[in-house]
Image (cartoon, rainbow, N blue to C red):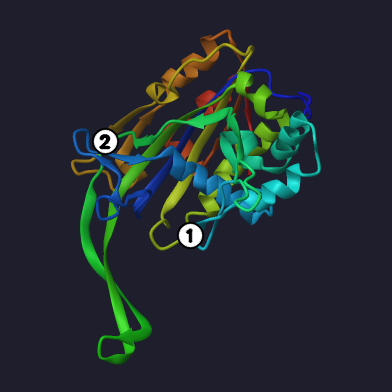
């Protein structure tokens, strides 16, 4: 592998992480309840939430991120963009500079908008990039349960109706009992040419996504989430995709009650093992696995395959 080379082969990603007594992705339109499919009793997490973890991790490492937030508010990046592109006259040079600066645009894509100037009546412009790394919405691989909410309050110093003093705010504290969440993602070589995503970027991404879930789920409502398994299948060409890798993982509930922990699940990944060993278009498989999950899912049967390379973070 040439780390500096642009990605020229497709990859597919399977990510599993669990959530215990936490709210992995609250729905602001539903009292911030965990996102939930009431027909299948499955917990849902949006791809936007997953990408936010990764972006926040990159920000913590002092990397330039275009879609950024400061104190929960979106940042107007017009000035930052202007400072980058004003150094260049050629359009392609401007694009290369933006892609070289913003790590999230290189991975996930974005529409970079530059506002016009009212005083000079200068029109705005924009650059649109479709990112090579994309994820589906995540969902639990088994039925889950939303626990009854307790009302939480906070006391803040300030002015009340009667004058100075303290005032409080009230809200609902919704939590998922337990959820083993699965995400499917792709790395498109065709899109990588557009955003100049390099081999070394993808290699770093394999580790960054695990670190992000470990380190950025430490707030009151997010603590209780643990990365369990990450796999990236790299194909031999830029046209092959197997499809949703979650379909190769069978999860059954062992307990009589709704699962409360990993111990309540029986996980069978034999279909995944067969896929790796039998599919001739798969060139290499990169795997990270949590030690506890490795025992539960008998991951050693997969990691012993010749195509598989394990890594640590």
SS category of the residue bearing label 2: strand
The image quarter in which residue 70 lies: bottom right
Report the quarter where the N terminus lies: top right
The image quarter in which residue 306 lies: top right
Residue 8 lies, in percent from the top left, at: 68, 18
Residue 305 lies, in percent from the top left, at: 58, 20
Residue under the point 44% across and 45% down: 49
In the visual, does 226 lie left or right of 32?
right
* Structural crowding at the residue carrying mark 1, measured as other residues with C-alpha within 10 Å and reported as few (<14), some (14–19) or many (≥20): few
SS category of the residue bearing label 1: loop
In the visual, does 305 lie left or right of 19?
right
User: Which residue is the extreme one toward the front?
Assistant: 120
Residue 63 in view of the camera? no
The residues bearing labels 1 and 2 have C-alpha atoms spaced at a distance of: 38 Å
Which is in the foreground here, disc 1 or disc 2? 1
Report the quarter where the C terminus lies: top right
Q: Is residue 6 above or below residue 279?
A: below
Determine which residue is flagged by label 2: 253
Residue 260 lies, in percent from the top left, at: 29, 48
Q: Nearer the viewer, residue 81 or 301?
A: 81
* Structural crowding at the residue carrying mark 2, measured as other residues with C-alpha within 10 Å and reported as few (<14), some (14–19) or many (≥20): some
Disc ID at residue 36: none
Determine which residue is flagged by label 1: 72
Residue 5 lies, in percent from the top left, at: 77, 25
Q: Nearer the viewer, residue 108 or 4?
A: 108
Q: Nearer the viewer, residue 125 or 135?
A: 125
């Amino acid at each position: 592998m040439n780390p500096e080379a642009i990605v020229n082969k497709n990859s597919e990603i399977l990510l599993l992480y669990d959530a215990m007594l936490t709210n992995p992705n609250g729905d602001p339109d539903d009292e911030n309840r965990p996102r939930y499919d009431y027909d299948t009793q499955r917990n849902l997490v949006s791809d936007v939430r997953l990408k936010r973890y990764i972006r926040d991790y990159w920000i913590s490492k002092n990397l330039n991120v275009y879609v950024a937030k400061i104190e929960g508010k979106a940042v107007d990046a017009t000035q930052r963009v202007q400072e980058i592109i004003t150094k260049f006259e050629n359009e392609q040079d401007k694009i290369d500079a933006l892609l070289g600066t913003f790590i999230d645009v290189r991975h996930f894509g974005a529409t970079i908008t530059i506002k016009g100037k009212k005083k000079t009546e200068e029109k705005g412009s924009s650059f649109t990039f479709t990112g090579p790394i994309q994820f589906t919405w995540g969902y639990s691989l088994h039925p889950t349960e939303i626990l009854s909410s307790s009302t939480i309050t906070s006391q803040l110093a300030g002015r009340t109706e009667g004058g100075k003093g303290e005032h409080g705010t009230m809200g609902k504290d919704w939590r998922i009992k337990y959820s083993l969440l699965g995400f499917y993602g792709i790395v498109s070589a065709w899109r990588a040419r557009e955003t100049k995503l390099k081999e070394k970027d993808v290699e770093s991404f394999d580790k960054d996504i695990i670190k992000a879930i470990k380190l950025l789920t430490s707030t009151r409502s997010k603590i209780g989430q643990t990365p369990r398994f990450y796999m990236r299948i790299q194909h031999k060409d830029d046209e092959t995709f197997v499809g949703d890798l979650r379909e190769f993982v069978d999860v059954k509930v062992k307990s009589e009650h709704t699962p409360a922990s990993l111990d309540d699940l029986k996980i069978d990944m034999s279909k995944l093992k067969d896929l790796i060993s039998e599919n001739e278009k798969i060139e290499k498989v990169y795997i990270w696995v949590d030690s506890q999950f490795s025992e539960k899912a008998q991951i050693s049967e997969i990691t012993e395959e010749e195509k598989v390379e394990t890594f640590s973070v």
